[in-house]
Image: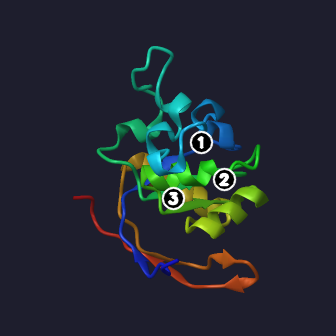
Amino acid sequence: MKPIQTIMAEAAALPRANVDTDQIIPARFMSRSRSEGYGDQCFHDLRFNEHGTPARDFPLNHLKSPPGILVAADNFGCGSSREAAVYALMDYGVQVVIAPSFADIFQSNAGKNGLLTLEQPAEQVEKLLALLREKRGRRERSTCRPRVGASDLSQERSRSPRD
């Protein structure tokens, strides 16, 4: 796995607590092969209404392209232990998820597959969520201390106006 040095990507807010793995990738889509990818099904039941049209109230539907950085609320990735949730996020284009906390199994699966999870204090995440609600999709630069197992590493993200 190639180490992440710097990420320049659009960031998006997903201000929902307890986003579970069934919301990330509904179970009915898990019969397709991994090689086909899961990006199209990522957040499917949140992104689309019952008629198959984009849900107006889902924040990721207001972006020009999928975000590379997802800022989420507490307990992201809870629920079942499906590794396909990580595949769906990565296939959708997400490289980093920032949240106050993650479900342990989700965080383990993310680490094994190259999806960076950054635990940040709730107050910091609230500030990021507010900034992203104010200005949908930004490129951010800040220094964080992600946890990888027992190791504490520095990670840098870039901040510049959205193109």
Marks 2,3: beta carbons within 8 A: no
Q: Is residue 119 visible?
A: no
Q: Give the numbered dot on residue 24.
A: 1
Which element is circle 1 on?
A: helix
Q: Quadrant of residue 109?
A: bottom right
Q: Give the numbered dot on residue 120.
A: none
Choose the circle earlier in sequence order: 2 or 1.
Answer: 1
Q: Quadrant of residue 146?
A: bottom right
Percent x, y of residue 77: 68, 50
Choose the circle earlier in sequence order: 1 or 3.
Answer: 1
Seen at 51% across and 16% down, the residue is: 50
Q: Foreground mark, 1 or 3?
A: 1
Which element is circle 3 on?
A: helix
The alpha-carbon separation of the residues under discs 1 and 3 comes to 21 Å
Seen at 54% across and 58% down, the residue is: 127
Q: Foreground mark, 2 or 3?
A: 2
Instruction: Give the amino acid type for the residue marked by disc 1 in the picture.
Output: Ile
Percent x, y of residue 13: 49, 49
Choose the circle earlier in sequence order: 2 or 3.
Answer: 2
Task: Specify few, some or many for label 1: CA neighbours under 10 Å numbering under 14, 14-19, or 20 or more.
Answer: many
Q: Which residue matches tag 2?
A: 83
| Above or below, 135 relative to 3 | above
The alpha-carbon separation of the residues under discs 2 and 1 comes to 11 Å
The alpha-carbon separation of the residues under discs 2 and 3 comes to 27 Å
Q: Quadrant of residue 149?
A: bottom right
Q: Foreground mark, 2 or 1?
A: 2
Q: Which residue matches tag 3?
A: 128
Q: How many marks?
A: 3
**Quadrant of the frame with the C terminus:** bottom left
